[in-house]
Structure formats: structure tokens, C-alpha cells
């Protein structure tokens, strides 16, 4: 297995092939019943088994599988379990280093962030300036709102219009919530939506561009696009992906 660091922190509620590998390792270490089901879900029984292993090996007992617990368990990972962990590691590396259109969406978002002092927030007719005037990086629009900024990032990248309108210069969070598909975990270039407007608008209040490492570029005020954590707001409503 490449390196001895855990690809990601595993804890109660985690899902994935690395959780299955963890349970297999716990079984070989004598902390998971031989006849018990080995699934991809980190449930309460997994939490108890991890804590038992941590107690037996004099590690901090927190039920989380970080680098220390993973390193202590590593001798109990068989070839198949190591393969499962490497698959997760490779998938996460791919997500952290997007290519093609996703990479270009992220790059455009960072152009906005870098030039945030010169990008104003507006919901009037000046919005969608980047698309209407065909502004390409390294240039950037000076007037956008949250959804039109996200639309510009997609247009610059040559990606499908997240509004599903073929870049006709119109669209808002209400048109972006229909196309694409809802996902549980974001990949760079996906859109993260926040809040919800009741009827008659019946749409999210805000949208930001996910750029990786748990962060988004969010354009929500006249201070321009800012780089913040994905959960900088407590009203995250959903995540949508428009690309494979």
C-alpha cells in the first residue's frame, strides 16, 4: 500500500470500500466477530470495535481511524483489504486533481477570487456580464451575482450550461437546481446550494462553486467572490453535479 497514512478519516457514519477493509482488518486483529457481516458502512458496532482495538493498543480512544489507528492496524490488512484502500486513495487523488472541464471551472472561480476587489455583486441587468460579453480568463466580469458567476465559470470551461438554457444570458438558482444530478459528496466544479426560498420562487437562496479540499468560491456580496469552507453557512441544501 502506498504510504502508511489513512486516505481519509473514518468515523461513525463513514461509507466506502475503505470501511469494508477496516472491518476485515479488525476481524484479523480479533476485534470483529468472524461471522459478522462486513459492509461498507461505519456503524455503531464498528465504532465499538475500533474503540476496543484502540484500548488494547493503548491509543487514544475516540472511535476514529486516523493515521495512528490506521498505522497500528496496518499489519492486519490483507492483500484484498489493501487493494480496497488503494482504490479509495486513487479516487480521492483524482477528485483532488481534476482534469479537463472541472479543472477549468475551478480555475475560473479562482480568477474571480483573486480579483474579488474588482467584481461587484448585482442582481440587476448587468449580471451575466461574463457570458453576455464573452469575457474569457485571464479577464473577468465586473458585475455578477452568485448564480451568474457560477454560470460564467462553466461557460469559460466549455462545460454545459448549469441552467440548461444554452448560455442565453438568463438563469438563476431556480434554473440551476433542475439540470444535472444531486450528489452526496462534491467534486471540484460542482455547485453547492444554500437555503431555500418558499413559493412562488421555490428555489435555493444562494449557490457557490466547489473548488476542492472542502472549500467553495462564493460570490454573495459586493466584497466579491471569497474562498470559504463549504459549510461556512449552516443552511446547505444540496449539491449538484453537471459533469461526469
Image (cartoon, rainbow, N blue to C red):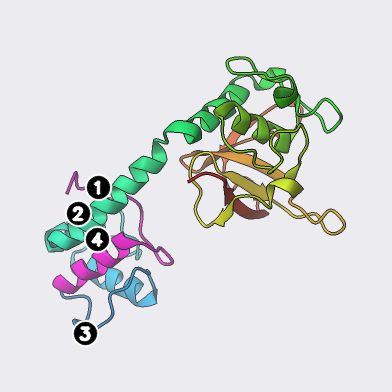
Secondary structure state at the residue bearing disc 2: helix
In the displayed orientation, state which residue is furthest to the front: 166
Horizontally, residue 149 falls left or right of residue 211, namely right
Residue 4 falls inside the magenta stretch? yes
Earlier residue among tags 3 and 2: 3
89 drawn magenta: no
Q: Mark 4 points at which residue?
A: 59
Residue at the spot x=18%, y=56% of the render? 82
Q: Nearer the viewer, residue 130 or 226?
A: 130
- The stretch in magenta equals 1-28
Please give the name of the residue rendered at 68% of the width and 31% of the height, measured from the top-left corner.
149
Q: Distance between the residues labelled 3 and 4?
A: 26 Å
Please tell me whether mark 4 sits on a helix, a strand or a loop. loop
- Give x and y (percent) for residue 142: 74, 19
Closer to the N terminus: mark 1 or mark 4? 1
The residue pinned by badge 2 equals 71
Question: In the image, which is nearer the foreground, mark 4 or mark 2?
Answer: 2
Q: What element carries label 1?
A: loop
Query: Marks 3 and 2, Cα distance to the nearest angstrom?
Result: 25 Å
Q: Which badge, 3 or 4, comes first in the chain's sequence?
A: 3
Amino acid at each position: 500500500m502506498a504510504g502508511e497514512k489513512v486516505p481519509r478519516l473514518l468515523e461513525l457514519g463513514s461509507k466506502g470500500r475503505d470501511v469494508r477493509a477496516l472491518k476485515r482488518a479488525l476481524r484479523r486483529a480479533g476485534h470483529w466477530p468472524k461471522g459478522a457481516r462486513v459492509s461498507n458502512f461505519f456503524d455503531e458496532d464498528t465504532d465499538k470495535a475500533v474503540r476496543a482495538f484502540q484500548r488494547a493498543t493503548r491509543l487514544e480512544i475516540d472511535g476514529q481511524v486516523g493515521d495512528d489507528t490506521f498505522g497500528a492496524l496496518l499489519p492486519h490488512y490483507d492483500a484484498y483489504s489493501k487493494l480496497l484502500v488503494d482504490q479509495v486513495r486513487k479516487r480521492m487523488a483524482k477528485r483532488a486533481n481534476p482534469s479537463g472541464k472541472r479543472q477549468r471551472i475551478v480555475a475560473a472561480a479562482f480568477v474571480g477570487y483573486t480579483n474579488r476587489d474588482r467584481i461587484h455583486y448585482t442582481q440587476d441587468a448587468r449580471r451575466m456580464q461574463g457570458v453576455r460579453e464573452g469575457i474569457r480568463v485571464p479577464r473577468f466580469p465586473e458585475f455578477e451575482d452568485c448564480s451568474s458567476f457560477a454560470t460564467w465559470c462553466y461557460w469559460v470551461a466549455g462545460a454545459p450550461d448549469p441552467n440548461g438554457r444554452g448560455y442565453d444570458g438568463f438563469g438563476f438558482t431556480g434554473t440551476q437546481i433542475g439540470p444535472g444530478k444531486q450528489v452526496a459528496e462534491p467534486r471540484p466544479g460542482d455547485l453547492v446550494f444554500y437555503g431555500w426560498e418558499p413559493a412562488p420562487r421555490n428555489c435555493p437562496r444562494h449557490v457557490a462553486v466547489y473548488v476542492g479540499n472542502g472549500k467553495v468560491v462564493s460570490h454573495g456580496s459586493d466584497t466579491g467572490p471569497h474562498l470559504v469552507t463549504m459549510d461556512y453557512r449552516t443552511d446547505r441544501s444540496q449539491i449538484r453535479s453537471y459533469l461526469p
